[in-house]
Amino acid sequence: MKIFRRPPLPGIDAGAALAEARQLIGRRVEQPARRAFLQRSLTLGGLSMLTGCSISDNAGVEAALTRISQFNDTVQGLIFDPARLAPTYPESMITRPFPFNAYYGEDEVRQVDGAAWRLEVTGLVADKRQWTLAALRAMQQHDQVTRHICVEGWSAIGKWGGVRFSDFLARVGADTSARYVGFQCADDYYTSIDMPTALHPQTLLALTYDGEPLPPRYGFPVKLRMPTKLGYKNPKHIQAMFVTNTNPGGYWEDQGYNWFGGS
């Protein structure tokens, strides 16, 4: 029996292309098990068949992985259950100290003047008035002890308190049939989430950590806390939010991380 061997693609170093693809998968796919599986099983033919893209150069590899990432986002969105709660934990299991995480060092944490701070609300909302910290603190508060899961492979349990984001969206008259909510932050970070996650009962505009006002290292004055999302989807130092039907992307998402970012 003759075994057919596909001839090498002209003008491409197959080994280099696959190495590049595996490296990109390492950045694009969050769950370690899924990432390892894709990296082990990846071949040029498999990548081409999965995506329908021509794998003839590094640009083709990048395009193919973009298609995989978009498919992953779609699947995560379809299987997300807005009624399913993330696990909660007793306070005895809180990680102390809770790790600092950001795209910059802890010595570069932004210092925000809480008295002067205002939350801008724009887009598809009825009430575009700015919010003060006092106004947010006057709303009903909720606490949760949940696990923060980082894309880098570590996790930690913390206690956050604040306003249910669904309550806030109702208060400002947000169009909850819209697809996205975007966030801009005082540390130049930005990200966005899907509306079902925005309305999830555990999604908080966090104002406190472990019963105390949110420290600067954890995102003072306001952090969006979502135990259903990976850490990079939880923005800190929020200063503006908007409701839209156009995907706003995000700091890491625009560099290749999956947009949905479910944990």
Image (cartoon, rainbow, N blue to C red):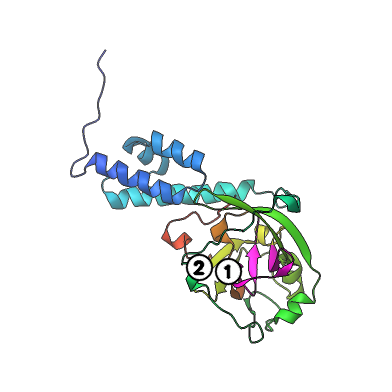
Q: In the image shown, does 101 or 81 lie closer to the viewer?
A: 101
Q: Amino acid at mark 1?
A: Arg
Residue 22, x across and y down, in percent: 36, 43
For image coordinates 76% across by 75% down, the residue present is 137
Residue 19 in the figure: left or right of residue 106: left
Q: Is residue 199 visible?
A: yes
Tell me where the magenta segment starts and ends, as one range.
Answer: 204-227
- The residue type indicated by label 2 comes to Glu
- 3 relative to 111 in the view: left or right: left
User: Which structural element holds mark 1?
Assistant: helix
Residue 205 painted magenta: yes
Residue sticking out furthest to the top? 1
Mark 2 lies on a secondary structure that is helix
Please tell me which residue is depicted at 49% across the width and 54% down the height of the picture. Answer: 258
Quarter assignment of residue 215 = bottom right
Q: As drawn, is 252 to the left or to the right of 111?
A: left
Residue 224: quarter of image: bottom right
Q: Residue furthest left?
A: 11
> Which residue bears the numbered disc 2?
106
In magenta segment, residue 206 = yes
- How crowded pointer 1 is (Cα within 10 Å; few <14, some 14-19, many 20+) is rated as some
Give the residue pinned by disc 1. 217
